[in-house]
Amino acid sequence: MGTAPTNKTPFRLAELKYKRKDQPLDLSDVLDLSDVEKLPEGLRRVELNLPRQEAVVETGWDIAENPVAYEYERAPGLIILPNVLPPRTQRTLIRKTLLRDIAKPYNKGNLTPFYPFIPGGLFAAAIATQQQSEEEQTLDLVQPLQDHLKPMSVRELLEKKLRWITLGHQYDWTSKTYPPSPPPPFPTDIALLSSRLVSVLPSSTHTWLAQTAIVNFYSPGDTLSPHTDHSEPNHTAPLLSLSLGCSAIFLMGRETKDVAPLAILVRSGDAVVMTGKARMGFHAVPRVIEGTCPGYLGEVGGQGEGEDGWVEEFAGYMRGKRVNLNVRQVDLDVDEA
Ligand SMILES: O=C(O)CCC(=O)C(=O)O
Ligand SMILES: [Fe+2]
């Protein structure tokens, strides 16, 4: 017992370690960059291209005034920008994805083959049912598109079944390609924010354009299996990943699972950028940590930020969720703007 040889890869072992719920979560080997007084050995500060070029930025979309970035020798090419999205930008992003982008029928998601598109968007529809009695809710169940599935309330679909939607170029998970037809529009504000973040990186010698994004919705208990993101024709354009809501453990490995990955605690407002060697590396999310949603997302309020009032519908959803925006360039080359 305990010492039996294992044929599990080092990546798999790390995944299992953070996934298991029968033992307290051990964060001792997890890199946490939220408060680095003393840089751990092997960690270096990355020089950023600052001051960043400041386009006219809409209110609510700022990035941190003085972003700081790190790279760890065990995960070359992975650039971590802790706390780069101020609370207000996080709230803007959440509002836009949940109310606006989800309401566009061309932004497909994991529910698309199984349940009909909800006009006005799943989130708005779920909010609208909050005032309904249970009886009214049962009358309003969404009928599935496939016989083996059961009718569900919009609330259940939102809270329990929605795992991801795609913005911009729509990746086809069956053929594992991006269809050649002109893609639906990618939200300009999210593209601008993404470009601004990528443009501060030292490797940004080429124009980079956000052309597709997966918005992942996780509840504690949900995981993302190890994978590489290799379907974009451009394997060198950085991949930007933004974390919102509950903290998670992100595993960053190499091009093979035979190397132990680096475990990083990603918190709300953090960005990680997979560049260089890390762009094609295996990565996974074995754990979303319950009860870690920051107060500025999980509680109602607005701290005098005017129209930025954060209402219970958003707070209630975010308390139990992690939302990840995974933003990519698809084309080999993009024109200079
Ligand atoms: O949720 C994350 O942090 C990673 C998501 C991811 O790797 C993906 O969508 O390809
Ligand atoms: Fe990924």
Image (cartoon, grey):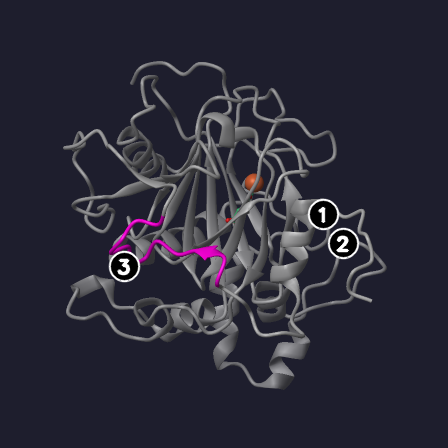
What residue sits right under mark 2 in the picture? 145
Residue 87's label in the rendered image is 3
The Cα–Cα distance between marks 1 and 2, rounded to whole angstroms, is: 7 Å
Does residue 199 show up magenta in the picture? no
Q: Determine whether 144 is above or below 187 in the image.
A: below
Q: Residue at x 76, y 48 (%)?
A: 8
* 314 horizontally vs 50: left or right: right
Does residue 32 show up magenta in the picture? yes
Mark 1 beta carbon near ligand 1 (under 8 Å)? no
Secondary element under disc 3, as helix, strand or loop, is helix
Q: Residue at x 16, y 65 (%)?
A: 306
Residue 113's label in the rendered image is 1
What is the span of residues highlighted in magenta in the rendered image? Answer: 28-40
The Cα–Cα distance between marks 2 and 3, rounded to whole angstroms, is: 38 Å
Amino acid type of the residue that numbered disc 3 sits on in the rendered structure: Pro
Main SS class of the magenta portion in the image: loop
